Amino acid sequence: MQRGYGTANVKAPDPTRSGALVVLEGIDGCGKSTMARRLVEWFQSNRIEAVFSFEPTLERYGAELRRSFEEGRRLTPEEELKLFEQDRRMHVEQLIGPNMEAGRVVVLDRYYYSSMAYQGVRGVYRPDEVHALMTSFAPVPDVAVFLDIPVETAVQRIMSGRGEVPNVMEKRDNLQRVREAFLAVDLPEWRRIDAAAPPERVFTSLLAVVQDPLERAGLWPVT
């Protein structure tokens, strides 16, 4: 896989929109869900309207994807990407778009960068092709934060946190390829932080990287 993909013909966040979009990305076990929820709580405690969501969703297409992963049966690359597209279109139309239009900060646990990485490593679609497809309808985030951890750390967290064997998406070899794909992302909104650090340090780093883009959007708490 060529490093630095995704830099050509990229979109920027729409400067006329009233809300903001913050995305947390990374391999399974990196702590995205915990940090995303904590970020929303932090916004709300500072009187900034914010909502949390995740992908794949629990709706029709997202639920089908989740079942396939949990049952250990990968769909074909074409079927998988189509379901992600359908799920994301519904998510944009029903939750992401309306909340941003209402001036809220939307914080997502996964977005189309995961499709670029997880589906991109299957070898049928290039990450830049996935990016072009998804950004044809999905809004570009104000900031997308990659919570980076070593694969061994991720697997240990998955097994100790849930007390179960990693599913088909969480196997070591797949996670290693996906991590490398995330490390290759080179987009204006992309930021990387060390998620293997203690949780308080991770959250401090997260606040530091989201501050500037949200200040530009006029949505950072006034002190």
Image: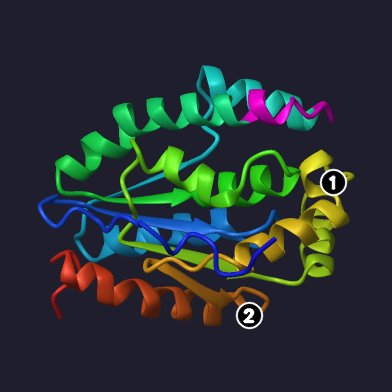
Which quadrant of the view contains residue 188?
Answer: bottom left
* Residue picked out by circle 1: 166
| Secondary structure, magenta segment, majority class | loop
Which SS class for mark 1? loop
Q: CA distance from mark 2 to mark 1?
A: 23 Å
The residue positioned farthest toward the right in the image shown:
165
Q: Position of residue 186 (x, y in %)?
A: 49, 68
**Residue 145 appears left or right of 140:** right
At horizontal 86% and vertical 56% (from top left) the residue drawn is 172
Task: Give the camera-side residue of 40 and 148.
Answer: 148
Query: Which part of the image, by quadrant, shows the C terminus?
Result: bottom left
**Residue 211 appears left or right of 179:** left
* Disc ID at residue 198: 2
Q: Position of residue 52 (x, y in %)?
A: 40, 46
Mark 2 or 1: the one toward you: 1
At horizontal 18% and vertical 64% (from top left) the residue drawn is 219
At horizontal 82% and vertical 40% (from top left) the residue drawn is 167
Task: Give the camera-side residue of 221 and 92.
Answer: 92
Residue 198 is inside the magenta segment: no
Residue 110 seen: no
Query: Exactly how many numbered labels are in the figure?
Result: 2
Which residues fall within the magenta stretch?
Answer: 71-80
Residue 28 seen: yes
